[in-house]
């Protein structure tokens, strides 16, 4: 295979990570127009739109979680798949070195990060032969936050708020609605779902993910499934989950359903949830040279239309300016729904940092601090680190640790996405702290709020899991859990559950 194949795959990786396809852009622009000005979801969608534009302008990762690279490749008979696989691995490693992909591949036993996105099972590459004399390469980058909201159901079964789901298309509809309700804002809504009816537990999930390679505006060739997709899209947004789970008119931007045969004893419904940062593209390559002959999902001859006319967070005048480190009085004055503009020092901390802090003293003084659930994309120029993408990660993973860390070390604010549970809410109230919800996926937008990298601790955990010492200026987020025992996430989950019951019934 010619070196052009490597170059073509590298171009595909970079473009997929940094430039949303036109059908997703159109859906997000429609979502932006559907939310009334000044609402929480409207402000969040404005940040998302700015982030999409910034990613294209700077060729930076749309989201700091650049996901699990999954390639679906069709090749002519006789193509050397061994060489192609190696060149795909080389391209993944090169894109990682360039900061277009975050190092995301870790040893499942030791947790050690490979540093180049390579390792057993990473990336995922599926080959299929066909009778055309061309190579088709499709790529999807699906992040961990939305991957964790995938769901699989074995029918018949009882579903909360919906009752019994039978082995019928109505039962399938109930499963899809339940999966979207259960995801709330944890999967960076508004999202899209790929659904598979049938198969076994493995093939069902694979087929569900394959549905995400369809465009959002296509029509299912199976009339029964087309009607089910339309029925889901006409009702699911009435759940009022909205962007990031803040409440709002748009919760889902797409639903794509496929069906494969099953065993008589099994009836699985598999749901692959993808976030608004719906990153998938493809190319058709010359079978002899490996050069790109045409792009799939996008036409490079058509210029990219910006999502917004201007950049910059739209202020309402009601924002609260906060200067870290924070005092008890600072956080006790805040209430659910307040939009804050945070400035000062901030420390990142994800899964490895939280586990470490349960057994060891922190490497920095965390009294009055802001702890950001974030695994940034970072690059090093000489001795200087720079952050190129820095959106929030899903916070619920830290629920087993967060309350104790707030209690022990005096953390005053936790920033993440999707909210946290009862233990954290109780600790916020008892010890005087707040949970701030940043906009998931807005990695370029938040990177620009970072004015400096002051240091790094625990780098042995790998760059996404290290504790980065940052300085930020006017970092916007919404108070969704306050120091008075109130939780927007709990409220939205309850209210949307009641709507789910009425829709599903």
Image: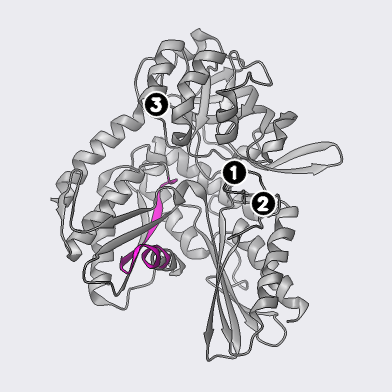
* Residue 372, position as x, y percentages in the image: 57, 30
Residue 37 in view: no
The way the protein has been coloured in the rendering is: one colour
* Residue drawn at x 29%, y 75% as measured from the top left: 261
For mark 2, what is the residue?
60
Q: Residue furthest right?
A: 382
Q: What SS does tag 1 mark? A: helix
**Residue at mark 1:** 443
Q: Between residue 453 and residue 352, name the one nearer to us.
A: 352
Query: Along the polypeptide, which appears first: circle 1 or circle 3?
Result: 3
State whether residue 411 is above or below residue 453. Answer: above
Would residue 21 appear left or right of 160 to someone viewing this image?
Answer: right
**504 with respect to 106 (left or right):** left
Residue at 69 percent of width and 40 percent of height? 463
Distance (Cα) linking label 2 and label 3: 31 Å
Among numbered discs 2 and 3, the one appearing first in the sequence? 2
Asked if 96 appears above or below 130 in the picture, the reply is above
Q: Are marks 2 and 1 in contact (CB under 8 Å)?
A: yes
Kindly identify which residue carries mark 3: 337
């Amino acid at each position: 295979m010619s070196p052009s194949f490597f170059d073509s795959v590298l171009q595909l990786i970079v473009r997929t990570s940094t430039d949303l396809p036109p059908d997703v852009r159109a859906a997000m622009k429609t979502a932006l127009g559907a939310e009334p000005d000044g609402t929480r979801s409207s402000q969040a969608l404005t940040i998302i739109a700015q982030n999409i534009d910034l990613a294209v302008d700077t060729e930076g990762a749309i989201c700091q979680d650049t996901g699990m690279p999954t390639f679906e490749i069709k090749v002519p008979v006789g193509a050397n798949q061994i060489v192609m696989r190696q060149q795909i691995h080389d391209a993944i490693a090169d894109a990682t070195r360039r900061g277009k992909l975050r190092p995301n591949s870790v040893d499942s036993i030791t947790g050690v990060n490979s540093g180049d996105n390579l390792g057993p099972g990473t990336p995922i590459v599926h080959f299929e032969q066909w009778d055309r004399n061309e190579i088709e390469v499709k790529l999807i980058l699906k992040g961990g936050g939305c991957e964790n909201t995938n769901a699989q159901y074995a029918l018949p079964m009882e579903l909360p708020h919906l009752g019994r789901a039978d082995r019928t298309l109505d039962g399938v509809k109930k499963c899809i609605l339940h999966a979207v309700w259960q995801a709330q804002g944890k999967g960076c809504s508004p999202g899209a779902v790929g659904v598979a009816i049938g198969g076994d537990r493995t093939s069902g999930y694979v087929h569900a993910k394959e549905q995400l390679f369809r465009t959002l505006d296509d029509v299912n060739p199976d009339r029964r499934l087309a009607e089910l997709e339309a029925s889901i899209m006409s009702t699911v947004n009435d759940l009022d989950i909205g962007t990031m789970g803040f409440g709002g008119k748009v919760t889902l931007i797409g639903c794509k359903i496929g069906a494969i045969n099953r065993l008589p004893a099994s009836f699985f419904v598999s749901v692959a949830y993808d976030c608004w940062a719906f990153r998938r593209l493809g190319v058709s390559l010359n079978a002899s040279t490996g050069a790109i002959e045409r792009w799939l999902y996008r036409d490079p001859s058509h210029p990219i239309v910006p999502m917004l006319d201007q950049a910059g967070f739209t202020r309402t005048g009601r924002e609260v300016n906060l200067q870290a480190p924070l005092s008890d009085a600072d956080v006790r004055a805040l209430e659910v729904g307040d939009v804050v503009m945070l400035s000062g020092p901030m420390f990142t901390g994800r899964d490895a940092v939280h586990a470490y802090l349960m057994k060891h003293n922190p490497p920095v003084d965390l009294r009055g601090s802001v702890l950001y659930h974030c695994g940034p994309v970072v690059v090093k120029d000489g001795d200087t680190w720079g952050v190129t993408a820095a959106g929030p990660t899903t916070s619920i993973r830290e629920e087993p640790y967060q309350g104790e860390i707030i209690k022990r070390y005096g953390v005053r604010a936790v920033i993440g996405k999707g909210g946290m549970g009862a233990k954290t809410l109780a600790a916020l109230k008892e010890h005087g702290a707040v949970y701030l919800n940043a906009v998931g996926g807005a990695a370029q937008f938040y990177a620009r709020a970072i004015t400096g990298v002051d240091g790094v601790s625990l780098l042995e955990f790998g760059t996404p899991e290290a504790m980065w010492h940052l300085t930020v200026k006017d970092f916007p987020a919404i108070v969704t859990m306050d120091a008075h025992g109130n939780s927007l996430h709990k409220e939205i989950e309850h209210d949307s559950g009641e709507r789910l019951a009425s829709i599903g019934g």
